[in-house]
């Protein structure tokens, strides 16, 4: 920002809004939209002022950004402006050079650096270019990790809203629905109208409910839903909200005075605009009663009636078009980008702690970092390479380099029979727990390094990304090392079976892990690797052949471990669908999104989606036997599997696919003890499903498409062509991209 002004006053606060707004940030990095008029143009506005009804607390900041597209965030990163503790207002002049050629602001939020920060907002003002002022209201549909209460002008704190005014000021009443709870019809054994702590409906036991038929402003829409309620004591009192028999959210109240809770919810009514709204008590354990004053539905955006997805005729590799499943499903692009940024803030910058922490990314010294498996308190090649892939997709070069240096320095073997491979599990101090590698780590290291080379360019030493990627590939081809004649170390890929091995060591190299099959990656290696390009093409083709063999004929589920003929390998119970196998769905979705030429992937995704749909999209478990029975007593509905099933929707033309996309959208960012695996898959899954898991090609770092292999008459085996189709006299000597035997080759 060019100009920043803090004004601290002891009295005489400026009035302007009809009500003060009390915001309680319940989560670190929780945020609230401050302007319902976004997007705004800098041609019309030059600044903004936020006034506080009470002295501003510590740990607040403003966030201003042009984020019209996720790709813009690298060019126009968010600006964070700290709010001075004790300030009564903060005024800013917009930096006209920061917001790009379209001179647009799409994000104007207040954000908490820590959880449990409480602030009372008084007035929000946009300053026009002519110096006049225009009031705006906060946008309750933007943000997360906070609760909002509307206060009267003369009441400091508490919810003083006895008349039941709409808790979202500044919203057109034509796009809102308000239901007074006492106007609903009670049901169940005990539900009835109450007069305290407000006039509303009381719910005493499970099955107590209240219903009413209401008219919504649109047939299908995304709403900010507010439920104003209270508990009979200070323990959590819950209530579930249904529309036309489908649960859209749960709400819990922890205080005895009126408190409003909010959630973003879809209301999909098909061809109707009327629907039955129902409150239902489902969590009573005898410790409290639930009171509800009213419900509000405030329309964020209309959603089109959903039809079956239309699969592209060509993949993103050829068209440079990456599908955003969330936008196709009716969610706003701004909300999608906001969720991506929240995932980064929580998993890479959030709070520490084993049981209740958020982050998995930990920096070491001045230039290293690792991804922590919080539950096992160790570092794994899987997570380290996943973290690098997330960083290259999010354009986070500094964090990428830190993760890579830690992996290169501590995890990669410098000598011995495993030279060039990465130890699959490490202690946090950089010492090795196990020497053997897990090939999925190597696969993600190689591909993320290649994409980094193409997106950012190569540096020196270990930051020559393309050289490092090729070195990992070549180290595999050199196994076993002739200097160790009795070594049992093997290549990452069985050269006869043309499949990735489970572990490249001894008998563990005689089977495979279906979730390690990454044909989309192999196809990039076939373009960019220095050597063995034809073999990597064969790897991709073999994976396409194996997916139907791995999959159960009825459920579509694949095992954790398999023999090279596709039959399940029963070692340790891993012949069932368990945690590794989740990723098969993501691998097929990615491959189809990028290349769109394996119809078996569409068939297999539908088969597996049908199975999970039969178990309930929001209820299915994380582990099953291949024939669909429960396995190992696991009844979790894990975020990691939810993410993988959403990515698989990229290869689905079945209308049920949208339910799996919705499930990921509704799933909170993983936190707590098990946030590592779930969190990494959640983040990558959200990148895939939002169209932000992209191929960066060796053309200067962008995603500009390279033409498809040229179609030529006659047999021209062994001939070289440039990308214009001109036949060359022989192998080119200049650096560039050429076509050889119908495939693109990079000459370095």
Image (tube, rainbow, N blue to C red):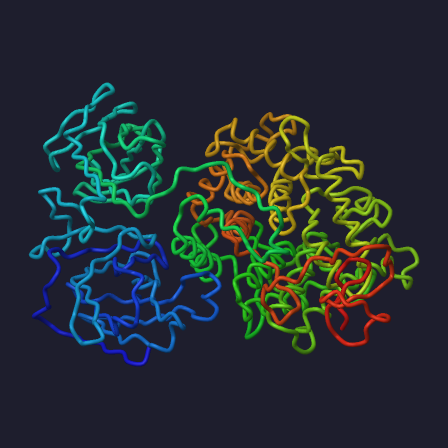
Q: Which residue does the image show at 80% across and 36% down from the upper left?
A: 565
**Residue 380: percent from the left, percent from the top?**
63, 55
Q: Is residue 134 left or right of residue 714?
A: left
Of residues 202 and 362, the one drawn nearer to the viewer in this rendering:
202
> At which x and y percent is residue 190?
21, 21
Q: Residue furthest bottom?
A: 2
Which quadrant of the view contains residue 695? bottom right
Q: Quadrant of the C terminus?
A: bottom right
Residue in the image at 45% along x and 56% along y: 340
The structure residue drawn at horizontal position 43% and vertical position 51%, both measured from the top left corner, is 356
Q: State which quarter of the image contains the N terminus.
A: bottom left
Q: Position of residue 5 (x, y in %)?
A: 23, 78
Q: Residue at x 19, y 70 (%)?
A: 89
Q: Is residue 503 above or below residue 69?
A: above
Q: Examine the rendered structure and indicate whether residue 649 appears above or below residue 530.
A: above
Residue 168, image x and y in percent? 20, 49
Left or right, 211 with reference to 611: left
Q: Is residue 649 left or right of residue 343?
A: right
Whether residue 685 is situated above or below residue 10 in the rendered picture: above
Q: Along the line of sight, which residue is nearer the eye, 54 or 179? A: 179
- Number of dots carrying numbers: 0
Q: Quadrant of residue 531?
A: bottom right
């Amino acid at each position: 920002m060019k100009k920043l002004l803090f004004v601290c006053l002891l009295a005489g606060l400026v009035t302007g809004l009809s009500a003060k707004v009390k915001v309680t940030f319940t989560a670190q990095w929780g945020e609230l939209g401050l302007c319902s008029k976004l997007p705004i143009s800098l041609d019309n506005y030059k600044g903004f002022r936020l006034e506080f009804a009470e002295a501003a607390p510590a740990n607040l900041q403003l966030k201003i950004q042009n984020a019209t597209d996720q790709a813009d965030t690298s060019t126009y990163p968010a600006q964070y402006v700290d709010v001075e503790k004790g300030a009564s207002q903060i005024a800013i002049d917009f930096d006209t050079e920061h917001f790009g050629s379209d001179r647009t602001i799409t994000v104007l939020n207040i954000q908490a650096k820590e959880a449990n920060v409480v602030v009372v907002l008084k007035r929000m003002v946009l300053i026009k270019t002519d110096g006049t002022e225009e009031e705006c209201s906060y946008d309750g549909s933007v943000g997360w990790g906070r609760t909002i209460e509307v206060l009267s002008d003369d009441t400091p704190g508490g919810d003083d809203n006895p008349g039941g005014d709409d808790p979202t000021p500044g919203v057109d009443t034509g796009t809102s629905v308000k239901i007074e709870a006492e106007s609903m019809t009670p049901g169940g054994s005990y539900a009835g109208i109450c007069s305290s702590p407000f006039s509303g409906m009381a719910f005493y036991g499970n099955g107590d409910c209240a219903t009413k038929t209401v008219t919504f402003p649109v047939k299908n829409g995304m709403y900010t839903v507010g439920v104003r309620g209270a508990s009979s004591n200070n323990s959590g009192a819950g209530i579930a909200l249904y529309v036309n028999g489908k649960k859209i959210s749960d709400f819990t109240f922890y205080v005895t005075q009126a408190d409003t809770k909010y959630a973003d919810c879809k209301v999909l009514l098909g061809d109707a605009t009327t629907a039955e709204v129902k409150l239902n008590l489902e969590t009573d354990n005898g410790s409290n009663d639930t009171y509800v004053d009213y419900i509000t539905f405030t329309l964020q955006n209309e959603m089109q009636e959903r039809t079956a997805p239309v699969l592209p005729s060509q993949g993103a590799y050829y068209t440079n078009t990456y599908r955003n499943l969330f936008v196709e499903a009716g969610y706003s692009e701004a909300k999608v980008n906001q969720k991506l940024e929240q995932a980064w803030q929580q998993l890479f910058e959030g709070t520490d702690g084993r049981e209740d922490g958020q982050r998995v990314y930990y920096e070491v010294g001045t230039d290293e970092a690792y991804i922590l498996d919080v539950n096992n308190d160790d570092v794994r090649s899987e997570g380290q390479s996943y973290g690098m892939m997330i960083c290259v997709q999010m354009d986070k070069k500094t964090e990428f380099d830190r993760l890579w240096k830690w992996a290169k320095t501590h995890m990669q073997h410098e000598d011995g029979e495993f030279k060039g491979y990465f130890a699959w599990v490490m202690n946090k101090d950089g010492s090795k727990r196990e020497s053997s590698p897990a090939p999925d780590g190597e696969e993600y290291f190689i591909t993320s390094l290649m994409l980094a080379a193409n997106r950012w360019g190569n540096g020196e030493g270990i930051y020559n990304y393309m050289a490092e990627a090729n070195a990992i590939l070549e180290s595999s081809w050199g196994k076993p090392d002739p200097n160790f004649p009795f070594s049992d170390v093997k290549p990452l890929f069985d050269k006869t079976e043309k499949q990735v091995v489970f572990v490249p060591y001894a008998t563990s190299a005689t089977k495979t892990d279906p979730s390690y099959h990454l044909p989309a990656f192999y196809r990039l290696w076939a373009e960019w690797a220095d050597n063995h390009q034809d073999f990597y093409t064969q790897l991709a083709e073999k994976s396409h052949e194996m997916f139907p063999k791995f999959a159960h004929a009825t459920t579509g589920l694949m095992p954790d471990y398999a023999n090279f003929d596709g039959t399940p390998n029963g070692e340790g119970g891993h012949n069932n669908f368990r945690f590794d196998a989740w990723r098969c769905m993501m691998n097929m979705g990615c491959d189809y999104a990028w290349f769109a030429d394996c119809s078996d992937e569409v068939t297999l995704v539908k088969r597996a989606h049908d199975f999970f749909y039969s178990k309930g999209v929001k209820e299915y478990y994380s582990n099953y036997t291949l024939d669909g029975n429960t396995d190992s007593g696991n009844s979790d509905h894990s975020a990691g599997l939810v993410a993988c099933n959403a990515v698989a929707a990229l290869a689905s033309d079945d209308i049920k696919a949208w339910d799996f996309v919705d499930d990921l959208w509704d799933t909170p960012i993983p936190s707590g003890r098990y946030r590592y695996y779930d969190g990494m898959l959640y983040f990558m899954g959200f990148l895939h499903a939002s169209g932000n898991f992209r191929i960066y090609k060796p053309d200067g770092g962008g995603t500009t498409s390279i033409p498809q292999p040229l179609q030529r008459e006659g047999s021209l085996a062994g001939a070289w062509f440039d990308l214009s189709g001109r036949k060359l006299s022989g192998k080119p000597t200049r650096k560039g991209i050429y076509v050889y035997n119908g495939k693109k080759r990079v000459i370095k």
